[in-house]
Amino acid sequence: MSRINEPRGKIQVIIGPRQVGKSTLMDQVLARTSIPYTLAKADNVDPNDLNWIKRVWESARGTMIVKNQTEHLLVIDEIQKIIHWSDAVKEEWDWDCSNHLPLKVVLLGSSRLMIQSGLNESLAGRFELIRMGHWTYAEMHDAFGFSLDQYIYFGGYPGAAQFIQDETRWKRYIKDSIITPAIEKDIKLTTNIYKPVLMKRLFHLSCNYSAKELSLTKMLGQLQDAGNVTTLANYLGILEQGQLVCGLQKYANDEARKYNSSPKYQVFNNALLTANQRGKFETIRTDADLWGRWVESAIGAHLLSTAEEQDYQVFYWRERDNEVDFIVATDDGCVAFEVKSGRRKMNSGMKEFAKAFKPLHSYIIGTGGISLEDFLQSDVIQWL
């Protein structure tokens, strides 16, 4: 709200994964603002109709001039659905700048890949990013009354919250409204995917392995596809950019050792782990080993949630039988996090890691340490 009320300066770009409430947030802001506005949505527009942006822009511009308004706000939702959208936006924005027209602009997009590609190519220096991430435990608890166990199991998609009493329906919603559009629309539109079936299988297997390690070579064997490790690594990077799932690298002082390690797979939202499983909440919750993995995955997702915005990286560490679940690295050093929830007994990983890397802090999350609830309700930066 405060950025909209400022004098015209930069294009405000709101980005984030699907179904996290970007459009809803914008609707709430528009309902509160006193600034006249034009709202346009590119949902059902021909992707090749580049002139659509020009027509929308000129309508807002014309309204502002005819009504002698001192300022006007143009909001375009799902902007990334228009091919070469950034070129059209640059042209119109620069025209307003040259003619000193105080037309403010907000763009919304659900594909980080497409939005960031367009911003980097055409709009450098003309925009500010507002990042919206997956919903936290605190947000799901406040909005929908989620318990800690429900959040760990069902994750943080607000649109799916109403279906959690019917797991079959909930899983269909996650797959049909979030996973399928993200992979088959957002990702395919942003880059050439030569093996779309491999990409889809990689996504599902990576989700199934959340909080587990598996080499790309072994992953390739399970996928039963004629791809190669380089292709898998590339596809995994694309899935990470889409804030779906990533492969955490082993923490090391040597960059080569980091990137040659077996990745530890980590979903950005535990809903993606759960939706790919055949079990039910009661079954998984009462299995200490299974539930321990869900807990660890939820902690990993929480650590990832603000990594880009707060400028830190998330790793894991293992040396023989010694391991530390998560390492968060900043410019000042690193912080170690070990999750203890009944999944396994404590090992000497924290002790050995401390000897080797001298972390700024070492934390136990769960039994005997920081409570799961306290950690998942906190801002990660507080622990660094």
Image (cartoon, rainbow, N blue to C red):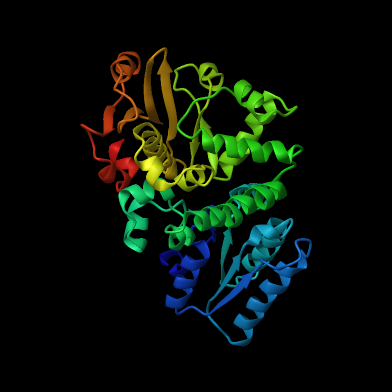
* Rendered view: 182 above or below 51: above
Q: Nearer the viewer, residue 30 or 373?
A: 373
Residue 304: horizontal and vertical position, in percent?
44, 40
Residue located farthest toward the bottom when viewing the structure as drawn: 67
Q: Nearer the viewer, residue 146 or 349?
A: 146
Quarter of the image with the N terminus in it: bottom left
Quarter of the image with the C terminus in it: top left
Residue 118: horizontal and vertical position, in percent?
66, 51
Residue 188: horizontal and vertical position, in percent?
71, 47
Residue located farthest toward the front when viewing the structure as drawn: 283
Quadrant position of residue 216: top right
| Residue drawn at x 65%, y 70% as measured from the top left | 99
Q: Is residue 87 visible?
A: yes
* Rendered view: 338 above or below 191: above
Q: Is residue 86 left or right of residue 305?
A: right
| Residue drawn at x 69%, y 29% as measured from the top left | 231
Q: Is residue 150 left or right of residue 110?
A: left
Q: Is residue 288 left or right of residue 176?
A: left
Q: How many marks?
A: 0
Quadrant position of residue 221: top right
